[in-house]
Image (cartoon, coloured by chain):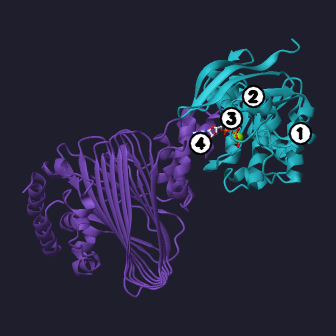
Chain colours: A cyan, B purple
C-alpha cells in the first residue's frame, strides 16, 4: 500500500527524573522516506530517539507510537531491535571485554531468529562483515577489539553505521552520527546511509548541520524545539535554518 | 575452649607421634593459646566462624588409593596431559599407580619425607607467624597428615595438576593438607591446585601451600576452590621470591559455602616480580574472604594485585589487599586494582586496598570500585537485539576479562571459563562467545 507509514508518533509526551521533556510530538514516517530532525541543544531530540529505542529511564506520560502497525511502546528494547528498529547513538558506549565481532553476530542472529531464519553460518558471516567493513573503510582489526573500546569519536560513529549495515533495519534513527566526523569520514558515513536507502527502509537523521544533508538528501525536514516539532518542510528548510538560525521559528510561535 | 578447638587438640593426641612431633606440639600449643580468630581480629572482621567453632571435628578417614575417587574427578584434568597428583583426605596418593615423574619434576609425599629425613623437611616447613591470618596455617602445621613436595629443576612446559579431594566420612570432618613447591634457578612451571569435595557432610579443608622461588625462576600458580555447597575452604598460600624470579598467581573461588584464602608474598630479591589475580564468585549464600599481602623487601621489585569479585543472592565477597614496602626497597612499583560487581540488592562486596610504605622512590598505585552492571552498556546491548539474560552474562564475563586474559595456560583458562560460565545465566550463549 503506497504511503503506508512505518512509524507514527502521536502526541507523545515523556519525562525524565520528573522533568517533562517531550511535550506532544507528532510525526509520521512513510516507507522509503528520509527525515531530518534539527533543533537547538537540549530541545529533546535525543530523548525522542531514546524513548523510541525503549530506554527505561524515560517515562512515557502520554501519546503513542506505532511501528509497522505494532504498538512500539509496549515492546521491550530488544524486541524493537529484532523487529527492525535501529538507533545509532549520539554517544556510543565503550564495552571493554565484549568483542565487537561477537556483538555483531549475536545481534544479527537475534534478528534472524525472530524471522524464523537459522543462525548465520560462521564463514558467511565473516565474508559479510569484511565486505561491509571495506565499504565503510574500517580496519578489520576493529573486529577483535572490545565494542567501541578505545575507538576515536569518528571510529565509533562508523561502527554504528557498520552495525546498521549488517542489521539492515526497517527504520534507522541516527542521532548526530555526523558530529565529530572529518569531511572524508562524513562522506563514508553518508555513503553507508545512502546504500541502505530503499523503498522498504526509512531513515531519521538527527543533525545540527546542513553539511550532512548535502550528501544525504532528506524528503522532509523538521525543526524540534522545546519538546515538540515546531515546523516541518522540505530540504530547503534546512538551508534556511543554516542561514537564519532557529530564532525566527521560535519567535513565530510566540506571535 | 570451643568444641572445634577441643576436637583439634584431641585429634593430635590420638595420632601416633611421627618424627615431626615436637614441631606439631609446639604449633598446637601456640594455636590453642591464640584460639580461633574472631570478628574482633583485624583481618577476620567480615567472617564469622562461630558456627564452625561450635562443631567437633574428626579426622577425615584415609581412603584406599583409587577407591571412590572417580566419583569426584577434577574438571581441571584436561589442563595437564599427565595424570594429576592427588591428595585425598590429606593423604598423597603416590606409589603404585602414581603419576610418572616427568623430566625436571620431582614429586614426593610429605609423609614419607617426614619418616625418612625429618630434619630436611623441618627446614622447609615455613614458620607460621602469630598474626591473625596465620592461625589456620599454625593449625595446619600441627595437623597436616601428608601432602606433596614438588621440586622443579628446569623449564617444564606441561602444567602440573594437584587435586585436593575431600571425601566426607559421616560426621563433620577436617582435612589438613600441605604442599611445598620449590624451584631451581631458571626453572619454570605452571602448577594448578584444584580443591574439590564430593557431596556429603560438611568438610572443613584447611590447606597450606608454600612456594619458594629461586633466582630467575618462574611459576604460574593457580588455586581453584570448587567444593560443594557445604564445604569450608581455608587456605594459606605463602610465596617467597628470590632475585629476578617471577610469580603469576591466580586465586579462583567458585565453590564452597565459605572460602577463606590468604596470600602472603615476600619479594626477597632485587627485580622479583609478583602478579596475583583473584576471581571471586559469591553466588547464592557463599561467603568468600581473601587477604593478600605483598611485602617488598628488596629494591626494584614489582607487584600487581588484580581482583574481580561478583556477588549475587545473599553472597558476600571480601577482598583485602595490602602492599608493604620495607625500608630500602627503592624503585618498588606496585599496583592494586580491586573491582566488585553486585548482581543483587542483598549481595555485598567489600574491598580494601592498603599501602604501607617505608622507602623513598617508590611508585605504588591502588584503586577500588564496586558497583552494579552499567545501565548504558546494558541498554546498548539490548538495543542491538541481545536479550536481557544474555546481555547480563556478557557484561559479567567482560568484567572478569582482565583476570581471564592474564592466564597463560590455555587449557587451564578454558576449563576455568567453562566452570565459570556454568554459574552464569545463559551459559550456552556464553560458550559461543568465547
Ligand atoms: N537522564 C536525564 N536526567 C535529567 N535530565 C535529562 C536526562 N536526559 C536528558 N535530560 C534533559 O533533557 C533535555 C533534552 O535533552 P536531549 O539530550 O534530548 O537534547 P538534544 O535535543 O538531543 O540536545 P543536543 O542537541 O545537545 O544533543 C535536556 O535539558 C537534558 O538536560
Ligand atoms: Mg542529542
* N-term mark: 1 or 2: 1
What whole-number distance in Å separates the C-alpha atoms at marks 1 and 2?
A: 29 Å
Label 3 neighbourhood size at 10 Å, few (<14), some (14-19), many (20+)?
A: many
Question: Residue A44, which numbered label?
Answer: 3
Residue that mark 4 sits on: B376
Is label 2 or label 3 in front?
2
Answer with mark 2 or mark 3, whichever residue precedes in sequence: 3
Q: Residue at x 26, y 40 (%)?
A: B200
The one nearer the camera, B431 or A161, is: A161
Residue A33 visible (yes or no): yes
Residue B201 percent location from the top left of the image: 23, 42
What is the spatial separation of the Cα atoms under label 2 and label 4, in whole angstroms? 38 Å
What residue does disc 2 label? A254
The residue at label 3 has a CB less than 8 Å from ligand 1? yes
Parent chain of label 1: A
Image side of residue B240 versus residue A114, left or right: left
* Residue B178 in the image, given as x and y percentages of width and height: 29, 65
Amino acid at each position: 500500500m503506497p504511503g503506508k507509514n512505518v512509524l507514527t508518533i502521536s502526541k507523545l509526551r515523556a519525562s525524565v527524573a520528573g522533568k517533562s521533556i517531550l511535550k506532544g510530538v507528532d510525526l509520521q514516517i512513510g516507507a522509503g522516506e528520509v527525515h531530518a530532525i534539527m533543533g537547538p541543544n537540549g530541545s529533546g531530540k535525543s530523548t525522542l530517539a531514546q524513548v523510541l529505542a525503549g530506554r527505561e529511564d524515560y517515562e512515557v506520560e502520554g501519546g503513542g507510537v506505532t511501528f509497522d502497525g505494532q504498538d512500539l511502546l509496549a515492546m521491550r528494547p530488544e524486541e524493537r531491535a529484532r523487529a527492525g528498529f535501529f538507533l545509532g547513538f549520539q554517544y556510543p558506549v565503550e564495552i571493554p571485554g565484549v568483542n565487537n565481532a561477537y556483538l555483531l553476530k549475536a545481534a544479527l542472529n537475534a534478528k534472524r531468529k525472530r524471522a524464523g531464519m537459522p543462525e548465520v553460518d560462521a564463514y558467511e558471516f565473516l565474508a559479510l562483515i569484511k565486505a561491509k567493513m571495506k565499504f565503510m573503510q574500517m580496519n578489520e582489526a576493529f573486529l577483535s577489539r572490545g565494542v567501541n573500546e578505545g575507538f576515536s569519536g569518528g571510529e565509533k560513529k562508523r561502527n554504528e553505521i557498520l552495525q546498521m549495515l549488517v542489521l539492515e533495519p526497517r527504520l534507522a534513527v541516527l542521532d548526530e552520527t555526523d558530529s565529530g566526523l572529518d569531511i572524508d569520514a562524513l562522506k563514508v558515513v553518508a555513503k553507508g546511509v545512502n546504500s541502505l536507502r530503499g523503498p522498504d527502509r526509512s531513515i531519521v537523521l538527527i543533525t545540527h548541520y546542513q553539511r550532512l544533508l548535502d550528501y544525504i538528501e532528506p524528503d522532509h525536514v523538521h525543526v524540534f524545539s522545546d519538546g515538540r516539532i515546531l515546523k516541518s518542510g522540505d530540504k530547503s528548510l534546512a538551508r534556511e535554518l543554516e542561514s537564519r538560525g532557529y530564532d525566527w521559528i521560535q519567535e513565530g510561535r510566540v506571535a | 575452649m570451643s568444641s572445634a578447638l577441643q576436637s583439634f587438640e584431641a585429634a593430635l593426641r590420638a595420632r601416633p607421634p611421627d618424627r615431626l612431633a615436637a614441631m606439631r606440639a609446639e604449633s598446637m600449643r601456640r594455636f590453642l593459646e591464640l584460639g580461633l580468630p574472631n570478628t574482633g581480629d583485624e583481618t577476620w572482621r567480615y567472617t564469622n566462624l562461630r558456627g564452625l567453632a561450635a562443631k567437633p571435628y574428626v579426622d577425615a578417614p584415609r581412603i584406599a588409593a583409587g577407591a571412590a575417587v572417580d566419583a569426584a574427578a577434577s574438571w581441571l584434568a584436561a589442563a595437564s596431559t599427565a595424570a594429576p597428583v592427588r591428595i585425598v583426605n590429606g593423604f598423597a596418593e603416590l606409589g603404585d599407580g602414581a603419576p610418572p615423574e616427568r623430566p625436571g619434576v620431582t614429586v614426593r609425599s610429605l609423609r614419607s619425607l617426614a619418616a625418612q629425613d625429618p630434619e630436611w623437611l623441618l627446614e622447609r616447613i615455613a614458620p607460621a607467624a602469630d598474626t591473625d591470618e596465620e592461625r589456620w596455617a599454625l593449625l595446619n602445621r600441627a595437623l597436616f597428615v601428608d601432602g606433596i613436595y614438588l621440586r622443579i629443576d628446569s623449564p617444564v612446559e606441561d602444567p602440573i595438576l594437584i587435586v585436593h579431594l575431600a571425601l566426607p566420612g559421616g560426621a563433620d570432618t577436617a582435612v589438613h593438607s600441605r604442599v611445598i613447591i620449590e624451584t631451581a634457578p631458571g626453572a619454570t612451571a605452571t602448577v594448578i591446585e584444584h580443591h574439590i569435595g564430593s557431596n556429603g557432610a560438611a568438610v572443613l579443608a584447611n590447606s597450606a601451600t608454600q612456594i619458594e622461588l629461586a633466582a630467575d625462576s618462574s611459576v604460574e600458580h593457580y588455586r581453584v576452590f570448587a567444593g560443594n555447597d557445604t564445604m569450608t575452604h581455608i587456605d594459606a598460600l605463602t610465596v617467597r621470591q628470590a632475585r629476578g624470579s617471577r610469580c603469576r598467581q591466580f586465586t579462583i573461588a567458585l565453590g564452597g559455602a565459605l572460602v577463606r584464602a590468604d596470600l602472603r608474598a615476600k619479594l626477597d630479591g632485587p627485580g622479583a616480580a609478583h602478579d596475583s589475580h583473584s576471581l571471586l564468585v559469591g553466588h547464592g549464600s557463599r561467603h568468600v574472604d581473601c587477604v593478600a599481602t605483598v611485602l617488598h623487601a628488596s629494591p626494584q621489585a614489582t607487584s600487581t594485585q588484580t581482583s574481580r569479585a561478583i556477588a549475587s543472592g545473599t553472597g558476600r565477597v571480601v577482598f583485602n589487599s595490602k602492599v608493604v614496602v620495607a625500608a630500602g626497597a627503592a624503585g618498588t612499583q606496585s599496583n592494586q586494582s580491586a573491582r566488585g560487581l553486585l548482581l543483587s540488592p542483598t549481595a555485598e562486596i567489600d574491598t580494601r586496598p592498603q599501602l604501607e610504605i617505608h622507602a623513598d622512590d617508590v611508585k605504588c598505585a591502588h584503586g577500588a570500585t564496586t558497583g552494579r552492571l552499567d545501565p548504558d552498556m546494558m541498554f546498548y546491548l539490548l538495543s542491538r537485539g541481545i536479550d536481557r539474560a544474555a546481555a547480563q552474562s556478557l557484561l559479567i564475563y567482560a568484567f572478569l576479562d582482565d583476570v581471564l586474559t592474564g592466564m597463560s595456560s590455555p587449557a587451564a583458562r578454558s576449563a576455568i571459563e567453562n566452570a565459570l560460565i556454568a554459574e552464569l545465566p545463559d551459559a550456552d550463549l556464553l560458550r559461543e562467545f568465547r
